[in-house]
Amino acid sequence: MKKIMELLSYAFVLVFAAVLFYTSPSDGASIAVQTVVGPHPIGNVAANEMDIAWASACATGVDSFAYPGKCLVLWRNANQVSDLTAGVKSEPDTMGRTADFITECSAGWDVQGLYISNPVGWKNATGEVVLLSASPDIEFMVLAISK
Amino acid sequence: MNGKLTWFEWALLGISICLLVTALCLVKAPEARGAHTANVNNVLGPYPGEIVDASANITIFYDFVESVADYKLQFACTGREILLAYNQAGIPMKFELISEPNQYRRSGNIVYELGAYEYAAFYYGSTDGWVASGTNIVNVSATTDFIKFGIIRLK
């Protein structure tokens, strides 16, 4: 009986660890990186080729995207009543930067952004940039810049 | 003939004044339909200093004056600008990126149909083929004021 209890305890710890791993906020939801057409598209621009879209932040308040090179990150507040905070998580760099880039977005579609032309201090060890948000009412858009 | 105007003469005078005012308005109208100059948003990054309120704000949408018949917009281009467009209408609407001839013989404007409530982006990563000769001005236009534009300049 004692052996069974031990096995059950181990199993419980393993399951708990797995749940923690898969629900860890550091993973976050993935925000799609969108490529911007230009400056000299070859041939005609096809239907929908220039379309871009906003993506809602996840409920955990932590999203991420794979750093594609130079990119423009935009966020806006879809909440029509409350101001909300959002921004980009900083990573330690050789310059000693540690502060996240967090701004307050006014209610009613206020748009803010950050141009990440250098990954140092923004891209983490797994190659991702982490986005932080106070609510799913925050919407993100990541635009990869070709050059 | 006694120096006083008859009702008919008063009416004729009134109609004449109305016609004169209308003609003046028509003459002035082409000036009012000129292209509007958009404010360009300088986006922060990659290492902004201390953030103060609203320092990261971006005004995305330029509203055309409602009475303007030609929905034209222009902005100073350095070859580092992103144009955002939004269709505020419930049906597809078109906008046009005006091209300028260059050494590669590019001369085709980009006419783009934007779906209802959708967004589009274009990267002016070069002035070549986009700015008018001898200027740094880029021109865009829309078929309706339901199309809203915003310009973001990258460092």
Image (cartoon, coloured by chain):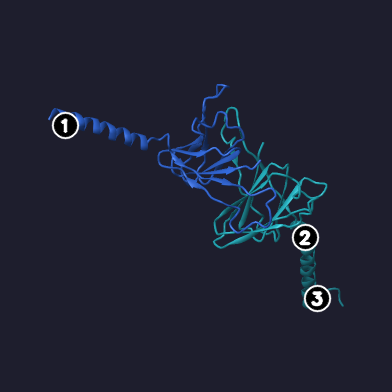
Q: Name the residue under label 1.
A: A4
Q: Colour of chain A?
A: blue
Mark in the foreground, 1 or 2: 1
Q: Colour of chain B?
A: cyan
Q: Name the residue under label 3.
A: B9
Residue B130 appears left or right of B51? right
The kind of residue on which mark 2 rests is Pro
Q: How many labels does the image show?
A: 3
Q: Quadrant of the N terminus of chain A?
A: top left
Q: Mark 2 points at which residue?
A: B30
CA distance for labels 1 and 2:
89 Å
Chain of the residue where label 1 is placed in the rendered structure = A
Instruction: Say if A35 sits above or below A48 in the image.
Output: above
Looking at the picture, tell me which residue is in the foreground, B128 or A109.
B128
CA distance for labels 2 and 3:
33 Å
Among the 4 quarters of the image, the one containing residue A69: top right
